[in-house]
Image: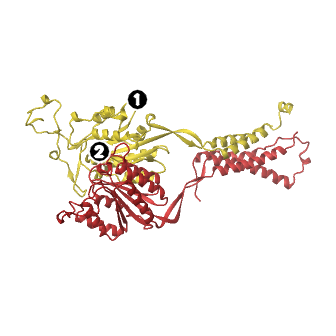
Chain colours: A yellow, B red
């Protein structure tokens, strides 16, 4: 009798498995927009590839971007942009990481420092301008992944740093709310920055005399601290600025500080898996209602019942008890 | 036909198919002597048939749960269409209205109008391949020639973000032409240049562009978004002194395009309506026989397998109902 009932139930469940439509269920997905620094310091070759060859920060970031995109669950979306000097250029708004992966791959592989339309690098201003775009409708509800080494050229005058509290996107947000992730690219020790000619051929490295080593823009914050300060003829002092601005490393302290201002997490890029972990955090999750196929559950129950019907270790003869029942 | 499983590990359940061979669906009934029950061939075969249906039911439930599907296939078809590359001006002036002002409440900027109309155009042409390149001072690769409509729309969306620097038409066109390098020559090939300014081309750029247009046989459409009271393609110089590419870059760029050996159409657009009209004309003109690949998405076979299981279970149920009740 029990087997007859379970056969009937199995038939019903199989029927359900056939006709059940996909049910809307919340799923974990992510919406990111990658913004990549394409200024010169990103050409520094301080990472090594799988074969031990030197690769630039730019190439390393591109590889990590693609690997992280692959690790996101389907239905997640990734957009792409680049920035140089103070302004970002969005290449496209977020697209699906599974369906549109070929496009993502082709365009990320084509990213190049030669896309840069101006040569300076002012990261805090660029981040400010990106966050302004993020509040617009094209990038609404996406999280920013900001790839940079934190090296600004020429050095900026902190007095004129943008005030993040004016940003609309940061207003009325809790302290735990996160805007995205700043990814510090580069190693901690300083390396030489390659120098290229007009045709993109490397012609050596930047030397100390090629670059300004201190900010000369505007007025200093506290003139009394500057050696040789002359209000009219030497507002920045009269001595020659020396420094190591022609060498570059990842400016982690600076990026962490920016992260605090912009309510973003900080991650130092070391390996692809690490970046993927840093991105796949619950604070970045975009819960979406996705149609989910659940008919395998009905099929599994039907299978269980069939297995019960054919359970091989049954008592050979009906026991006395079941005899009495019958 | 290429078959694959989405959860192959579930196939470990397949040994459950052996259950019906080891056990019987029916109650055991005692008979005084085995010889009393005549086993004819029909009985034997019926018995085997019942077991086969049981095996079938279990096997199809398991394979259905493992997600048997036909892989995505591409089918080559012939239709009408084109390979179209949009070369989009991302200079700062694109964010102004046709009147040359910052857009007010109910006004559209040139970039916004172009974005809306181009994205309509893209969704009306199902078989075309579209690529997107952008340029300001430098060209940038946005998305390759692709049939992924969502990605193309996302790339066109980027026009709504703030523009960058200047208008360097030559480099933008060069980037657009490079998209055709490795493409099979089928259907019409079109470059749609959307810009609101022009620039003088030096000799080197002119020679390269002339060569490339000839080599790749790409026809050119220029949507010139003319600002009110600004110089246009057809503006006549007031004196012969003004008739040079520095003063009237639009006129001279137009003259250069006219000397190309490929079909060239220029549309001077100064309102949203005229932009719409010129896009409609492009839609009409560019339809040559096109060999395109249509993707047939992967098809799940689970419903068919569940149906098979359902059918087998129904048969088993019928047999079970016929069982002699003791």
Which residue position is annotated with label 2? A87
Q: Residue furthest bottom?
A: B261
Which residue position is annotated with label 1? A176
- For the image, the number of numbered tags is 2
Residue A112 in the image, given as x and y percentages of width and height: 31, 52
Residue B234 in the image, given as x and y percentages of width and height: 28, 63
**In the figure, residue B239 lies in which quadrant?**
bottom left
The N terminus of chain B - image quarter: bottom right
Camera sees residue A50: no
- Residue at the (39%, 52%) spot, across then down: B115
**In the figure, residue A283 lies in which quadrant?**
top left
Of B226 and B147, the residue lying toward us: B226
Which of marks 1 and 2 precedes in the sequence? 2
Q: Chain of mark 2?
A: A
B146 relative position to B238: left or right: right
Of A77 and A195, the residue lying toward us: A77
**In the figure, residue A4 lies in which quadrant?**
top right
* Element type at mark 2: strand
Residue B320 in the image, given as x and y percentages of width and height: 81, 44
* Position above or below: B323 against B259: above
Q: Are marks 2 and 1 in contact (CB under 8 Å)?
A: no
The C terminus of chain B - image quarter: top right
Residue B207 in the image, given as x and y percentages of width and height: 26, 67
A167 relative position to B81: left or right: left
Q: Which mark is residue A70?
A: none
Q: Given this view, does label 2 or label 1 mark the residue nearer the observer?
A: 2
């Amino acid at each position: 009798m029990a087997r007859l009932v379970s056969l009937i139930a199995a038939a019903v469940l199989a029927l359900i498995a056939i006709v059940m439509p996909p049910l809307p269920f919340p799923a974990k997905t992510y919406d990111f927009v990658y913004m990549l620094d394409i200024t010169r310091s990103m050409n520094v070759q301080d990472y090594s590839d799988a074969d031990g060859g030197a690769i630039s920060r730019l190439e390393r970031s591109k590889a990590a971007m693609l690997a992280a995109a692959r690790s996101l669950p389907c239905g997640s979306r990734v957009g792409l942009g680049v920035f140089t000097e103070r302004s970002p250029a969005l290449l496209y708004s977020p697209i699906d990481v599974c369906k549109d992966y070929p496009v993502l791959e082709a365009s990320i592989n084509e990213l190049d420092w030669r896309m840069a339309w101006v040569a300076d690098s002012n990261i805090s201003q660029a981040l400010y301008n990106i966050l302004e775009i993020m509040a617009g409708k094209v990038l609404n509800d996406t999280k920013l992944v900001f790839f940079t080494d934190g090296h600004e050229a020429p050095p900026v005058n902190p007095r004129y740093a943008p005030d993040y509290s004016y940003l609309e996107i940061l207003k009325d947000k809790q302290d735990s709310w996160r805007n995205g992730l700043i990814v510090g690219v580069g190693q901690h020790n300083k390396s030489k920055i390659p120098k290229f000619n007009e045709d993109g051929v490397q012609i050596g490295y930047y030397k100390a005399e090629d670059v300004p080593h201190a900010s000369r823009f505007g007025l200093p914050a506290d003139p009394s601290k500057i050696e040789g300060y002359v209000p009219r003829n030497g507002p920045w002092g009269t001595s020659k600025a020396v420094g190591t601005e022609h060498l570059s490393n990842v400016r982690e302290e600076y990026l962490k500080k920016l992260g605090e201002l912009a309510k973003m997490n900080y991650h130092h890029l070391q390996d692809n898996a690490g970046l993927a972990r840093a991105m796949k955090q619950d604070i970045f999750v975009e819960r979406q209602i996705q149609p989910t196929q659940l008919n395998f559950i009905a099929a599994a129950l039907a299978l269980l019942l069939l297995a019960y019907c054919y359970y091989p270790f049954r008592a050979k003869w009906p026991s006395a008890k079941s005899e009495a029942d019958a | 036909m290429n078959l694959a499983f989405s959860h192959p590990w579930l196939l470990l359940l397949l040994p459950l198919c052996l259950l019906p061979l080891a056990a019987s669906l029916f109650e055991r009934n005692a008979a005084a002597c085995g010889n009393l029950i005549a086993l004819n061939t029909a009985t034997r075969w019926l018995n085997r048939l019942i077991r086969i249906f049981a095996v079938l039911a279990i096997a199809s439930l398991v394979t259905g749960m493992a997600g048997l599907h036909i892989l995505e296939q591409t089918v080559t078809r012939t239709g009408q269409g084109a390979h179209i590359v949009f070369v989009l001006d991302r200079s700062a002036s694109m964010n102004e209205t046709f009147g040359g002002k910052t857009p007010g409440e109910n006004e559209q900027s040139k970039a916004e109008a172009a974005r809306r109309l181009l994205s309509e155009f893209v969704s009306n042409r199902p078989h075309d391949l579209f690529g997107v390149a952008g340029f300001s001072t430098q060209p940038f690769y946005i998305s390759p020639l692709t049939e992924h409509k969502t990605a193309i729309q996302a790339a066109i969306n980027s026009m709504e973000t703030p523009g960058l620097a200047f208008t360097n038409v030559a480099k933008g066109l060069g980037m657009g032409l490079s998209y055709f390098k490795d493409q099979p020559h089928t259907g019409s090939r079109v470059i749609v240049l959307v810009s609101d300014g022009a620039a003088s081309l030096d000799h080197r750029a002119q020679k390269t562009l002339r060569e490339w247009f000839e080599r790749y046989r790409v026809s050119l459409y220029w949507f010139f978004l003319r600002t009110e009271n600004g110089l246009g393609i057809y503006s006549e110089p007031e004196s012969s002194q003004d008739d040079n590419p520095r003063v009237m870059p639009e006129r001279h760029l137009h003259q250069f395009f006219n000397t190309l050996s490929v079909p060239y159409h220029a549309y001077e657009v100064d309102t949203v309506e005229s932009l719409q009209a010129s896009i409609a004309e492009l839609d009409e003109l560019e339809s040559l026989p096109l060999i395109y690949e249509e993707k047939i998405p992967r098809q799940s076979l689970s419903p068919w397998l569940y149906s098979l299981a359902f059918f087998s279970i129904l048969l088993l149920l019928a047999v079970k109902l016929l069982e002699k009740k003791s």
